[in-house]
């Protein structure tokens, strides 16, 4: 029984040592818990910072690629627009050249018929020569008659003849009658 009594007495000492070590363990646990919490916080903050850095780099990469894509689209659009403008200028120039050539051909062929124009000019020149010869003959006849004299009695140095009548109807009548007037100039 003595051992039993010793055991009971040692029970209280045993409990005291148990509780003492438990209190020591709780103090250590709190220190360890605080240290572990700080370590976990550091690891988590590192992971979060790394994740944010990765997201930032990813966002920059996406933005860079999208800006490059938009730049390529804008370049293609500008190139297409420039090519469209150049084609339009070429077509306008070509159309202008075709119009110019066609108008020149049409004008020469139908409006200003060159051969008909030459015939007309030749006929005018022939009529003019005949008319001038007529005028010279008339002037010589007048000189022979002695009627062409100025106030001093000498011959007129310069004599201009023209039609007496004006207007279409009078010219038409005068073609048949060939009436002339003498206009004196000194």
Image: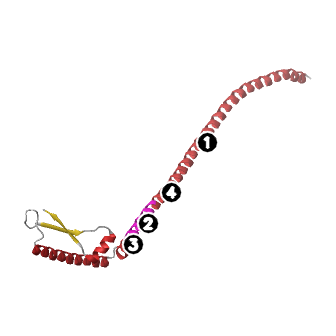
Please state which of the two labelled residues, at mark 2 or mark 4, is closer to the viewer. 2
Residue 75 falls left or right of residue 109 = right
Write down the quadrant of residue 6 in the picture: top right
Provide the residue span drawn in magenta.
85-103
Q: Position of residue 98 (x, y in %)?
A: 40, 70
Q: CA distance from mark 3 to mark 2?
A: 16 Å
- Decide: few, some or many residues near mark 4? Use Cα within 10 Å; few <14, some 14-19, many ≥20: few
Image: 130 above or below 52: below
Q: For mark 3, what is the residue?
A: 102
Q: CA distance from mark 2 to mark 1?
A: 59 Å
Q: Which mark is residue 51?
A: 1
Q: Secondary structure at mark 4?
A: helix
Mark 4 / mark 1, whichever is N-terminal = 1
Write down the quadrant of residue 117 in the picture: bottom left
Q: Which mark is residue 91?
A: 2
Mark 3 / mark 1, whichever is N-terminal = 1
Residue 17 falls left or right of residue 143 = right
Q: Residue at x 28, y 77 (%)?
A: 176
Q: Which mark is residue 77?
A: 4
Mark 2 / mark 4, whichever is N-terminal = 4
Along the viewing direction, whichever of 47 and 156 lies nearer the viewer: 156
Q: Quadrant of the C terminus?
A: bottom left
Q: Position of residue 68 (x, y in %)?
A: 51, 52
């Amino acid at each position: 029984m003595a051992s039993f009594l010793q055991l009971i007495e040692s029970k209280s000492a045993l409990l005291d040592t148990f509780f003492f070590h438990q209190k020591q363990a709780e103090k250590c646990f709190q220190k360890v818990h605080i240290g572990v919490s700080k370590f976990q916080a550091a690891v988590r903050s590192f992971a979060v910072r790394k994740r944010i850095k990765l997201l930032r780099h990813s966002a920059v990469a996406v933005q860079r690629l999208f800006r490059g894509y938009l730049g390529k689209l804008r370049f293609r659009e500008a190139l297409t627009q420039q090519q469209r403008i150049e084609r339009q200028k070429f077509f306008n120039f070509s159309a202008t050249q075709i119009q110019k050539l066609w108008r020149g051909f049409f004008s020469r062929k139908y409006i200003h018929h060159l051969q008909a124009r030459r015939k007309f000019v030749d006929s005018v020149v022939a009529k003019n020569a005949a008319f001038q010869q007529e005028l010279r003959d008339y002037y010589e006849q007048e000189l022979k008659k002695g009627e062409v004299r100025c106030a001093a009695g000498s011959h007129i140095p310069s004599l201009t003849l023209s039609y007496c009548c004006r207007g279409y109807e009078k010219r038409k009548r005068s073609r048949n009658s060939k009436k002339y007037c003498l206009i004196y100039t000194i």
